[in-house]
Image (tube, rainbow, N blue to C red):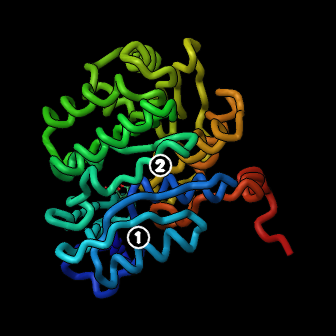
Amino acid sequence: MALLTAQHPGPLAHVSSMGLGIGGSESNVAIGVQRLGGNAVWCGRTGADSLGQLVRREIRAEGVTVRSIEDLSAPTGLMLKERRTMATQKVSYYRAGSAGSKLMPEDLDASLISGAAVLHVSGITPALSATAAATIREAIDIARSQGVTVSFDLNYRANLWTTEDARCAYQELIPLTDIVFAGDEEAALAIGPAHEPTDLAQRLAELGPSQAIIKLGSKGAVGSIDGEIYRQPAVAIEPVDTVGAGDAFVAGYLADLMAGKAPSDRLELAAKTGAFACLAYGDWEGLPTRAELALLHQTESVTR
Ligand code: KDG
């Protein structure tokens, strides 16, 4: 999607200038993986309009390979971010009928999926339309038939569907995945509440995924990975913008998975990349390269 961000706090109706950029969970993850030295391909549907051109150009400029269908009959989706107060953000979507919502199984390139190490999808896409949901299912089926690892981030968006529809989709998709990421509330929505996040991770893993990671924001993360429980503390930071931190976490985890790293290393990198995303304004702009990771521990405020 294109993303318009209010430049100052206050009611949107009184905001006189907005910054134009892009956002989207999957493109955030693709850019994050690419910056960490991976090799990402982003597949999607954009309008044959200026905003579509912007989306494709920005993702490509990050080194991600873009496979985008240009839809002549639908506009590129749009998202607005407002800061009503300095401490609170509100996201509004203008994506009903957008090109992204017209995604369909025919848009998939099976050879791209079968040649990948990991297929990553989010629970946002199935919320957009029946054809978008069918596309996610088809992509997962192709990946599974070729032995490609399937990664799924529940990414519940209350404005896009009902909790009941979301739960049905999650319960269909989770057993088909190898890696599942969820916030604790998202996991509880999918499988019912638990006293401890570790229970949520274990119960998600019992549905099929060998790696079930519960993202806990400033409290870190827990994972049930290949039958073992892992606990990852968060990096202590002063966040300026937390939108996109979950995608950054996923990018860190997947980048180190593909680099052949152990579960504890994957989680540690995920916590660092999640922290980085919160230290800059924008959904993905603050994603780190590997060389930048050391900045989290740098004490000098100016280096020359
Ligand atoms: O995860 C960050 C996302 O919220 C954002 O970049 C846009 O994909 C998005 C969505 O639908 O909210």
Q: Which residue is pictured at 27% across the width and 31% down the height? A: 170
Determine the quadrant in which ligand 1 lies.
bottom left
Amino acid type, label 2: Ser
Query: In the rendered view, would you say 95 is above or below 270?
Result: below
118 relative position to 260: left or right:
left
Does residue 127 show up?
A: yes
180 relative position to 127: left or right:
right
172 relative position to 139: left or right:
left
**In front here: 121 or 251?**
121
Query: In the rendered view, would you say 106 is above or below 165?
Result: below
Mark found first going from the N terminus, 2 or 1? 1
Does residue 82 show up?
A: no
The number of numbered discs placed on residues in the rendered structure image is 2
Q: Secondary structure at mark 1?
A: strand
**In front here: 242 or 115?**
115
Q: Secondary structure at mark 2?
A: helix
Amino acid type, label 1: Ile
**In front here: 57 or 185?**
57
Q: Quadrant of the N terminus?
A: bottom left
Q: Which residue is pictured at 28% across the width and 47% down the height? A: 135
Query: Which residue position is annotated with label 1?
Result: 22
Residue 189 badge: none
Q: Quadrant of the C terminus?
A: bottom right
Question: Picture coordinates of residue 119 (x, y %)?
Answer: 47, 42
Q: Which residue is pictured at 59% across the width and 59% down the height? A: 287
Q: Which residue is pictured at 63% across the width and 44% down the height? A: 255
Query: Which residue position is annotated with label 2?
Result: 111
Question: Where, by quadrant of the figure, is residue 164 drawn?
Answer: top left
Label 2: how many Cα within 10 Å (few below 14, some 14–19, many 20+):
few
The CA distance from mark 2 to mark 1 is: 27 Å
Question: Picture coordinates of residue 159 (x, y %)?
Answer: 18, 51
Question: Picture coordinates of residue 244 (x, y %)?
Answer: 45, 54
